[in-house]
Amino acid sequence: MVAESSTARRPAHPTAASGRWSHLRVPVSALLIGILAGLLPLASSGFIPGAPTSAAAAATATPTPTPTADAATTDQVTVTVAPVSLAPLRSGQDLAVTVRITNGSAETITPGTIELYLAERALTSRSALTAWLHPTKTGKPGDLMLRSALPAAIPPAGTATVAISVPSADVGLTSGNAWGARGISATITEDGSVLAQGRGTFVWYSNEVVTPVALAVVMPITVPEQTEGLIPAKSLETYTAPGGRLSRQLDGVINRDVTIAIDPMIIASIRILGNTAPASAVAWLGRLGQAKNDIFPLGYADADLTLQAQAAAGTLLVPLSFDQSLNASDFTSPTPAPTPSTSTPTPTPTPTATGSAPAGLTDTTTDTTTDTATPTPPPTSAPVITPGTVPTSEQLLAWNYTATDIGWPLTGTVSAADLDVFTAGGLSSLILGGANTAQSDLTETPNANVVLAGGHGNALVTDEPISAALRTAATATTDSDWQVAMAELSSQIAVVSAERPATVRTLLATFDRDTVPGGVRLSETLAALSGLGWRAPATVAAARAASPATDVSFQSQAVSDARILTARTLLHREGEVTAFSTALSKPLAITATQRLTTLALLSTSWAQDTGAWSEAVDSSLADSSVLLSSISVSTKGPINVVGSQVDIPITLDNALGQSVTVKVQVVPSNGRLIVGGDVIEATIEASSARTVKVPVTAAVGNGAVTLRITLFSPDGSVVGQPSQIPINVRADWEGLGSLIFAALLVLFFGFGIWRNVQRRRRERTAVAQATDAPVEPPVDPPVVPRG
């Protein structure tokens, strides 16, 4: 950068090429912002030096002797610098900044010098702003404004926070300088050697007419990963307790100019508990119903839209029913109505008119307004449930949403083929990250609205640098980190406003699902954002209605192959459970439960922990395998078949809590057995067994046969795994047994006749011996001739 010749630095208007959608032109900016945030120490301990050594500056500090644990892990010295106030600096005002030095090295920093510099040129484009905050190499820090002594040493893992006021004369800006973002840098030197340099920004204002940037902000309200599709009561109690995840999220955004994107699983999980729901959860849901925020739903369980589409789900999944999880006894008496909160912050009014001098160009980082009125809930914000009656599935999910056709896929994962699935699923508007867009050489930031080709509606592209700064501020753990992030957020918006002084731009910033900002810091951030005179609140509907960006187009991306493969396994198992359920008398009892499980396991919350996700999927697959084997054949064999026609008994088991109807198909492995009759249909009562008899005919030959038993549902779907029963066939044993029996019968009677003959001979011999008379041979009678 080249210094200006005049002490009144900075041009009146931008002349150099400026960035448009810095997240498009400089795609690594969000990453660099994250790196900067990671380098900023998270603790505030250390020492503070004493009075300044320059008459031109007043520096104050507060010592904190305890070393920070996080500082020691950086292994280097870091410096951050930010304005004390977000109010723009005006002509004649001193510049108050906070400089924070963190000693992450193993050596003590001896008393050195802090030098404050002002960037040589105004930051008139987003690319210039990014280059200043995240330089690729160390360059000239600017024009020296102030040199201040650091009188005390900084021990390893220690920090020093110094408040410095630079007189307006040393700042060198006058009313002749154009309003907008300015760069500042702070350098810490030791014995003439530069140890570290930090950069920041502030906004200069010279009474120009400012056109505020219309900025819509979207906040997702979600819960950590679930495995069953309904949040347990104990978890709900934890999440909605004071300081709980859901309480922090709602406390920070309720009744502010922030659009809420909520997971419908939260609403259904509270309502389905009836009068057994935790009191804190009921009160939380009541507050949400009374909120003035625009609200639109995420997918149920915040199931990943692109993962479903690319895993060939065919359509976006929705819950089938909640009847299987409803308990009538939980609705015997009405649930007590929650007491509306009387201390919910309301947004600070901000200017919305175009072309007028911005009101409120003062520091409004503290929001002291309260909501003392009791708002009337929207007429359909709660379901029409008659006390003492069990609600329907539709009533459990009912809500007075501002819009229901908005989809919010994970950033940078949407492919071109997904758009057809989203459109078929009723999503006519998408929220996309910058990675899903491509553009020509843009010089100014366009509107967030982009028209998608092929009749796929529109997309709202998030402004990545603004979103990154907003998220960093809302999750900051120290005041110093918050000041740095808010200064960058303020400057980002100011640059956009100054790009086209007379043209309103409508942008979109989002909080992400991975980081949950705390309630107090989130409220502080949003209050400070509302106080910026160059930002006007906007709704998502206004962003959708803004003129589309003509030079920005959709850029196809994709989910990782590993995640797609796992998702396909889940979807395939759901298909198996659906086919299995056709044998049941109440199929929704298992298909609806399986659908909720599938949606929970497809949640975007699993995307950052693939290891835990794989374990959860494996556990779900094991559970569903037990379900699929709950109807089975318990007959094991072997069975001996010794006749030509017999009935083989086959026992069927049903381990489910409802009756099932199956068809039994028996197929022999070879021709030794012939199965007769039609396919047998059997109904098995809940938790019982039934034996059916299968007629078979022995054919030719003896040997082993295996009967393959397959169960089908009435509509022909296979139920469970086929079973195999070994059979021993002795087809000729019946004829052989008859021959043997006949032979034995002949022998038996022949032996009896022989014994009778022998007995009579013995009897005659015995009589003759007893009388001692000779035994004369018998005499034949005389022959008488016929006459």
Image: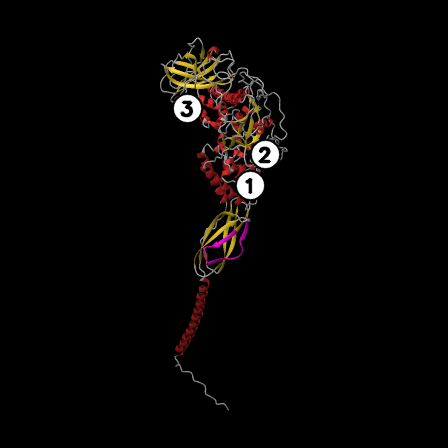
Q: Residues within 10 Å of mark 2 (few under 14, many from 20)?
A: many
Q: Earlier in the sequence, mark 1 or mark 3?
A: 3
Is disc 2 placed on a helix, strand or loop? helix
What's the CA distance linking mark 2 and mark 3?
53 Å
Q: Which residue is mark 1?
A: 589
Q: Which mark is residue 396?
A: 2
Q: Which mark is residue 613?
A: none
Q: Nearer the viewer, mark 2 or mark 3?
A: 3
Q: Which residue is mark 3?
A: 136
Query: Which one is in front, 433 or 259?
Result: 433
Residue 565 inside the magenta-drawn segment: no
Mark yes or no: residue 473 visible: yes
What's the CA distance linking mark 2 and mark 1?
17 Å
On screen, residue 135 versus residue 376, left or right, reads: left
Tell me the chief SS of the magenta region: strand
- Could you tell me residue 604's position as x and y percent? 50, 33
In this rendering, the answer to whether 529 lies above or below 704 is above
Which residue type does callout 2 highlight? Leu
- Could you tell me residue 649's position as x and y percent? 50, 53
What's the CA distance linking mark 1 and mark 3?
59 Å
Mark yes or no: residue 479 visible: no
Query: Which one is in front, 611 or 564?
Result: 564
Q: Which residues are magenta?
A: 664-683
Which residue type does callout 3 highlight? Thr
